[in-house]
Image (cartoon, rainbow, N blue to C red):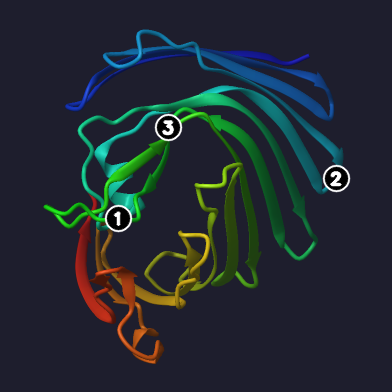
Amino acid sequence: KKHRLDPLAQLLIRQEQQRFAAAVGGGAELADWLDVEGEVRFFTSLAVPYLFPFRLTLKGYPLDRLSVSVGGGYRLRERNLADVLAAFDYQDLPGQLPDNHGWFGNLNAQISFENALLFIADVTLSHNSAWLRHGTIPDGVTGLFPAVFDADLWVLETEATLRFPLFSWLSINALGELDIPFSDTVPASGRVGGEAAIEDINGAFGVSLKLTVASTTGDRIEFPYLDARAYIRLFENMKFIIEGLDLLSPLSGGTREAESPYLAPGIRGRFKFQITF
């Protein structure tokens, strides 16, 4: 049998609230086709006196090209201001940032094919103490939408990914996500999309197109977003990048509404230099 133990300790201090976390994990090979691994953490902060998140996962390879993992436990998802701003552009910053924690169970399956096609399906049933979404009525003073943290909420989180490297320089990926809350007041949200990318095998240049269709309110599906990106590596540690965003907005039949009364910026371009040290 193969055994491993991976100790880990970390200290996280942020401006919003002090956090401390320590973790220890390990795993073992139960059979040639079956592994088990787990982790236990200790977490404390100003808002949460103490928590002991943990997870236990069984991963098996019943067939040559099929892997399946089943796991569960009690998870903790720490929050920061970047999470709030990434969730919605017109969201007001909350006075407090509650971390989301609760029980969960997960099922993951990966199937690979001879032509290098890879399909990944992931399903998680989770109980959430602070599920993040934005409110539907803007504040009368700021005009921004308040951040809403739903407590005691069960959510079915699903994700499917398809990866298809046609050639060494061309790949096509597809992604679908859907979160289904078990609530009459919290809407489902999801998105589907695809990306085609051409990239030099040495990383000298690359071009990609990304198409995304999303629904964040449960009853309104947004007009598709099409983004393009190209880069050229000028030096080993420097890239010149050009991006075209929301290229389909002129075809949307009018102004694109982000969330009433706000309008999306529409088609636009960006030029960037990226330097890696």
Kind of residue sitting beneath label 3: Ala
User: Residue 136 appears in which quarter of the rendering?
Assistant: bottom left
* Residue at 34% over, 28% down: 98
Disc nearest the viewer among 1 and 3? 1
Give the farthest residue toward the right. 63
Disc nearest the viewer among 3 and 2? 3
| Closest to the observer, 139 or 164 | 139
Label 1 element class: loop
In the image: residue 150, left or right of residue 267: right
Kind of residue sitting beneath label 2: Asp
Residue 208, compared with residue 117, is above or below; it is: below
Circle 1 sits on which residue?
137
Residue 34 x/y as whole percent: 81, 26
| Closest to the observer, 115 or 25 | 25
Pick whichever of labels 1 and 3 is earlier in the sequence: 3
Badge number at residue 130:
3
Circle 2 sits on which residue?
64
* Residue at 26% over, 53% down: 145
Kind of residue sitting beneath label 1: Ile
* Residue at 22% over, 48% down: 92
Badge 3, how many Cα within 10 Å: few under 14, some, many 20+? many
Give the farthest residue toward the left. 141
Residue 63, compared with residue 12, is above or below; it is: below
Residue 144 x/y as whole percent: 21, 54
Q: Is residue 128 visible?
A: yes
User: Residue 48 appears in which quarter of the rendering?
Assistant: top left
Label 2 element class: loop
Badge number at residue 5:
none
Image quadrant holding the N terminus, namely top right
Separation (CA) of disc 3 from disc 2: 40 Å
Residue 123 x/y as whole percent: 67, 43
